[in-house]
Amino acid sequence: MTEARETLDRLWKPGCEFLGSEVAILGGAMSWVSERNLVSAISNAGGFGVIACGAMEPERLEEEIVATQALTKRPFGVNLITMHPKLDQLVDVCLAHNVSHIVLAGGVPTSAIIKKVRDGGARAIGFAPALALAKRLVKMGIEALVIEGSEAGGHVGPVSLTVLAQEILPHVKGIPVFVAGGLGRGDAVVSYLEQGAVGAQLGTVFAASQESIAHENFKKAFLRANARDAVTSVQLDERFPVIPVRGLSNEGSRRFLKLQAEMVQKYQEGELSKEDAQLSIEHFWAGALRRAVIDGDVENGSVMAGQSVGMVKEVRPVADIMETLVQQAVEVIAKRDHRVKDLG
Ligand SMILES: Cc1cc2nc3c(=O)[nH]c(=O)nc-3n(C[C@H](O)[C@H](O)[C@H](O)COP(=O)(O)O)c2cc1C
């Protein structure tokens, strides 16, 4: 087993070195969920927590960073949404507080913002949903990438991690690549490390952890759910685009379909302009994640969850979850080594 653990440590060494953590597992930023408690718990357990800035104002983010630093002496990151109108100020706040890693999410970051992060002494991490973009981001100076498959919770692209990994991992050279989406066990993490990833980002399995501040109802919904319940939002009409978000289907998602049908009808009958109909569709989910995570309204709120939700069976402390992930990774390597020896 020690040999297997050494193999695991060799496989994710570049990831650990890049993050400054013991294990190369990032707790993916989750709006409303990834705050001081969960982030510090993940970093204290040897992983790498990431604060979700979401729509926070710079002062709020500053407060959260300072509070997290009071709970952990280990490194953690901050996830910033590139289309935030105060992105520049948010980066300033991170740099002023010596945040070591900034994850630029929700769109392609500009070269200027990547440079600002790096010049300020932090590491810049980006997301690549396709090989062409991965190569472009490397040229723009990004220092690490996360490739996130459509199995993930929250906003998702159309391609599964199985395919993205094959498309991207063999061709991105020189910077570490982390995988995300649908990962609930250490064995799966190992399979991607063996394909060239340096670590993994998990969200769903940490959202229902003991340290997560998510409402009890939110955690219970996770425990009840199977993989098939975590579905992407449905777009009814191609003229009215819907951003794909993966979450548990509920009364809210059923009402969302009805609303789209009503808007399409009103538009067709000349009662509403296309813009107004689209705006109503876009506004439907405003504040809905908060409603589910904080208020516990899991019927009308947005219960964002990845397909790995089917593997969440109980509310456990982050350190236990992390330990199990490492154990599963070590066991699968040991079993593989035995199999190979037996064959030889
Ligand atoms: C409730 C929830 C909220 C999320 N919010 C964000 C976010 O604000 N920013 C972001 O970059 N990713 C967000 N994500 C994605 C996670 O950071 C992570 O990449 C994803 O959960 C990994 O896939 P998994 O859920 O299958 O583990 C969210 C995911 C969940 C489940």
Image (cartoon, rainbow, N blue to C red):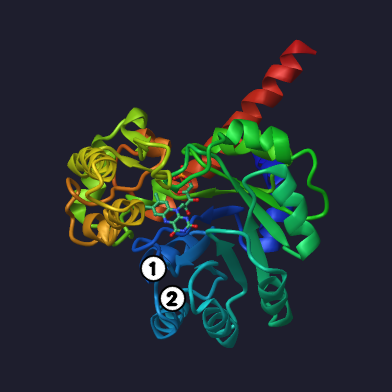
Image location (x, y in percent) of residue 95: 60, 83
Residue at point 75%, 18% (across, down): 341
Residues under numbered marks 2 and 1 in contact, where contact means CB atoms less than 8 Å apart: yes
* Residue closest to the eye, 234 or 224: 234
Image location (x, y in percent) of residue 336: 67, 24
46 horizontally vs 300: left or right: right
Determine if residue 3 is in view: no
* Residue closest to the eye, 109 or 306: 109
Q: What amino acid does circle 1 point to? A: Glu
Instruction: Using the rendered view, name the quadrant where residue 56 is placed.
Output: bottom left
Q: Secondary structure at mark 2?
A: helix
Instruction: Using the rendered view, name the quadrant where residue 268 is placed.
Output: top left
Q: Is residue 158 above or below residue 74?
A: above
Mark linked to residue 221? none
Give the spatial CA distance, label 2 vs label 1.
Answer: 8 Å
Look at discs 2 and 1 and give the one toward the viewer: 1
Q: What amino acid does circle 2 point to? A: Thr
Callout 1 crowding tier (Cα within 10 Å): few <14, some 14–19, many ≥20: many
* Residue closest to the eye, 184 or 166: 166
Callout 2 crowding tier (Cα within 10 Å): few <14, some 14–19, many ≥20: many
**Residue that mark 2 sits on:** 68
**Residue that mark 1 sits on:** 35
Image location (x, y in percent) of residue 194: 71, 35
101 horizontally vs 307: left or right: right
